[in-house]
């Protein structure tokens, strides 16, 4: 259940009918009136929304997790999946039907992929990657480490949890395996102080 939808999102109208259900994508169609009064069939895809989490830990929190650190760190993942080369990304995944909203999905995905729980959560970005797909990507900032538990990975996941400083992430993001680490809201230069001060989009 979506709790926050940006005003400029282009979503499937309520009168649309699902004409095909796939493993990832569903196809919806509806009659659309043209300027001359004629009707044309419009079509859009729908897929489950995605959550992405940027976890930030203090140097002390990073050391408690077993990482060497003298300054704040970003938690990232090194992942392997079937039919995919090794890649780096922030924790995240799809919103499931059992998730009450996008924040619940973000907390679950972070816990499953990293084993980490955080106290403070802020929604800092929502984007619709393609206008013809009813699909929103929610980016959350997580701070205030609470605990570390065991990962709970899917059968098709191999995930290594890593902590890196801003400069290290910037350098890593230049490689082909780390294109998912590039986030527009961070600007051309990753400024952690600026990221931490980003306004919250929605109060959960």
Image: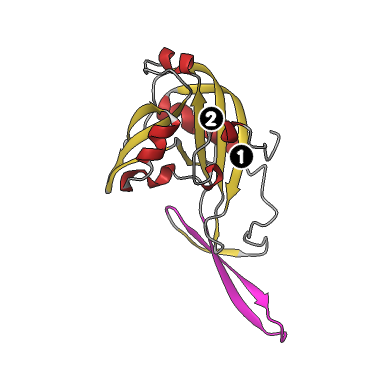
Rendered image: mark on residue 107: 2
Q: Position of residue 142 (x, y in %)?
A: 55, 28
164 relative position to 155: left or right: right
Q: Position of residue 17 (x, y in %)?
A: 60, 64
Q: CA distance from mark 1 to mark 2?
A: 15 Å
Task: State which mark lies toward you, 1 or 2.
Answer: 1
In the image, residue 27 lies in the stretch drawn in magenta: yes
Q: Main secondary structure of the magenta part?
A: strand
When the figure is inspected, residue 31 is found, relative to residue 137, above or below; the finding is below
- Residue drawn at x 36%, y 43% as measured from the top left: 178
Give the camera-side residue of 99 and 111.
Answer: 111
> Is the N terminus in the top left, top right, bottom left or bottom right quadrant?
top right
- Disc on the earlier residue, 1 or 2: 2
When the figure is inspected, residue 179 is found, relative to residue 134, above or below; the finding is above
SS at mark 2 in the image: helix
Q: Which residues are magenta?
A: 23-46
Please indicate, yes or no, whether residue 157 appears anywhere in the rendered image. no
When the figure is inspected, residue 48 is found, relative to residue 37, above or below; the finding is above
Q: Position of residue 100 (x, y in %)?
A: 61, 36
When the figure is inspected, residue 47 is found, relative to residue 96, above or below; the finding is below
Q: Position of residue 73 (x, y in %)?
A: 45, 25
The quarter of the displayed image where residue 148 is located: top left
SS at mark 1 in the image: strand
Q: Which residue is mark 1?
A: 124
């Amino acid at each position: 259940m979506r709790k926050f939808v940006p005003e400029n999102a282009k979503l499937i109208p309520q009168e649309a009918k699902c004409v095909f259900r796939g493993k990832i994508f569903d196809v919806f169609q509806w009659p659309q009136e043209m300027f001359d009064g004629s009707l044309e069939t419009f079509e859009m895809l729908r897929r489950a929304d995605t959550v992405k989490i940027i976890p930030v830990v203090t140097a002390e929190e990073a050391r408690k997790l077993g990482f060497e650190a003298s300054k704040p760190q970003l938690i990232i993942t090194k992942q392997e999946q079937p039919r995919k080369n090794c890649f780096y990304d922030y924790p995240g995944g799809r919103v499931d039907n059992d998730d009450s909203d996008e924040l619940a999905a973000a907390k679950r995905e972070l816990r499953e992929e990293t084993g980490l729980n955080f106290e403070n959560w802020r929604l800092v970005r929502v984007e619709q990657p393609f206008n013809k797909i009813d699909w929103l990507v929610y980016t959350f900032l997580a701070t205030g480490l609470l605990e570390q538990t065991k990962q709970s990975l899917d059968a098709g996941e191999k995930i290594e949890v890593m902590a890196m400083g801003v400069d290290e992430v910037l350098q890593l993001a230049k490689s082909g395996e780390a294109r998912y680490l590039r986030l527009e809201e961070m600007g051309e230069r990753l400024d952690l102080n600026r990221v931490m001060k980003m306004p919250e989009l929605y109060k959960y």
